[in-house]
Image (cartoon, grey):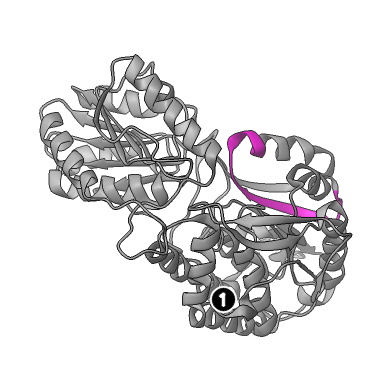
Amino acid sequence: MKQDLIFDRSYVNGEWTTEGTATFEVTNPANGEKVATVADGGVTITEKAISAAHKAFGSWSKKTAKYRSAILEKFNDLILENTDELARIMTLECGKPLVESKGEVAYGASFIKWFAEEGKRVYGDVIPAPTEDRRIVVIKQPIGVIAAITPWNFPLAMITRKIGPALAAGCTVIVRPTYESPLTALALAHLAEKAGFPAGVVNVVVGKDSAGMGKAICESDLVKKISFTGSTRIGQVLMAQSVSTMKKLSLELGGNAPFIVFEDANIDKAIEGAMVSKYRNAGQTCVCVNRILVHEKVYDEFTSKLTKAVSQLKVGNGLDTGVNIGPMINTAAVKKTTMFVEDAKQKGGDILIGGKAIDNCFFEPTVIGNATKDMKFSSEEIFGPVAAIYKFSTDEEAIQMANDTIYGLASYFYSQNVARCWKVAEALEYGMVGINEGLISTEVAPFGGVKYSGHGREGSKYGIEDYLEIKYMCFGNVI
């Protein structure tokens, strides 16, 4: 690994800086080995980053979109040039298989590339005036300093998906990654510096005091927007703490994704979609399938084929060749997954394959048949390699079951009936719907949810709007 991509302290105002002597360890979830010791910046370094970003906003926001685009293009190139090193860092700190980490680098860079262009298309309007002596113009301006608070499971893409549109719009950014996976974020800070972002435009603060650092961001009048990806509970806390400063918030929160298999579905394609959506990153993604709803006529065929496919998955260290399922992020995650399986067993679920923790780091890829509504994972996010399969009889029952949750992030279904596809897609109460497709994330489409899964959208032409303010200008007495 290139040592120049390993950094052990916060990056603020163009400098690698520490505050005090406190440190924390970043460990490999596959074996508990120390990856790095990192300086704990805490609240103090967060406040310094806010000040630096505020100071830098004045000049950065006045740069042309073309100027900002050129730096973003360079940033994209540097990310792609360092794919192998970035992927290895990701796998070391969050455990996902190396092939998935490399895929995330490409996916993450795509947002930088997309918004390098999209920033040049922030258009306003000229509105026909109600009187002859007036002219009405609408322009869009960058909102100001934004904070990106990101999770461990996508330590690169969740950052670029937020800072790409922010930087393109003319905002300055503070990134606060989770303490489990800060190294990827710090490597991005280094590449951002090499790309040419001026001091204070991109800042990355690391520390274990997540609550304190988050509170400082929420309560600062200088931070105008927060973009957060994480649990619904923490999203509610951030929203409550931001009330006094009237911030904009984009919240991408928990999910309970249904995956519906109708009787006319192409079962083999549905198996492919379920596998990629359920077991990617050991089931530890926000859009992972949580409940698989299968029509009773094809239940046995689907369940048999899914179990066979799961039996071929290889569990192990993400750096090892051929591994499909890496470790859980920590011991608590293993215990939570075990609890879900034991609860299902006690309530009549059939363990068709797997069902046990391998050790404190890994959990067997699992399929549970005859799942029912009273099982805990019916209403809670599994976030592990466990597929729960339910039966249904009618389209109406499937839609009701799918929508029977407080969450509304991603949903999926398989059918070859065009009329059914339109009806079901429109009826599902989710921000995103995969129709005969299990992998729906892309930089060109709006990513986000409804209900308790949050609000706001990332990616696509819509993704830059939350980083802009609309200003109406009325010119009077022009004739």
Does the segment drawn in magenta span residue 311?
no
Residue closer to the observer: 469 or 136: 469
Q: Relative to residue 202, is residue 350 depicted above or below?
A: above
Q: Where the C terminus falls, by quadrant?
A: bottom right
Answer few, some or many: residues within 10 Å of disc 1's Cα (few below 14, many 20 plus, some between 14 and 19).
many
Q: Position of residue 230 (x, y in %)?
A: 59, 44
Q: Is residue 219 left or right of residue 121?
A: right
Q: Is residue 403 left or right of residue 472?
A: left
Question: Callout 1, which amino acid?
Answer: Ala
Q: Is residue 426 left or right of residue 134?
A: left
Measuring 27% from the left and 40% from the top, which residue is drawn there? Answer: 413
Measuring 32% from the left and 32% from the top, which residue is drawn there? Answer: 355
User: What is the quadrant of residue 263 in the picture?
Assistant: top left
Q: Position of residue 405 (x, y in %)?
A: 44, 26
Q: Is residue 133 visible?
A: yes
Q: Is residue 107 left or right of residue 324?
A: right
Does the segment drawn in magenta span residue 233?
yes
Give the magenta part as a residue range: 220-235
Q: Relative to residue 37, is residue 385 depicted above or below?
A: above
Q: Is residue 131 visible?
A: no
Q: Which residue is mark 1?
A: 116
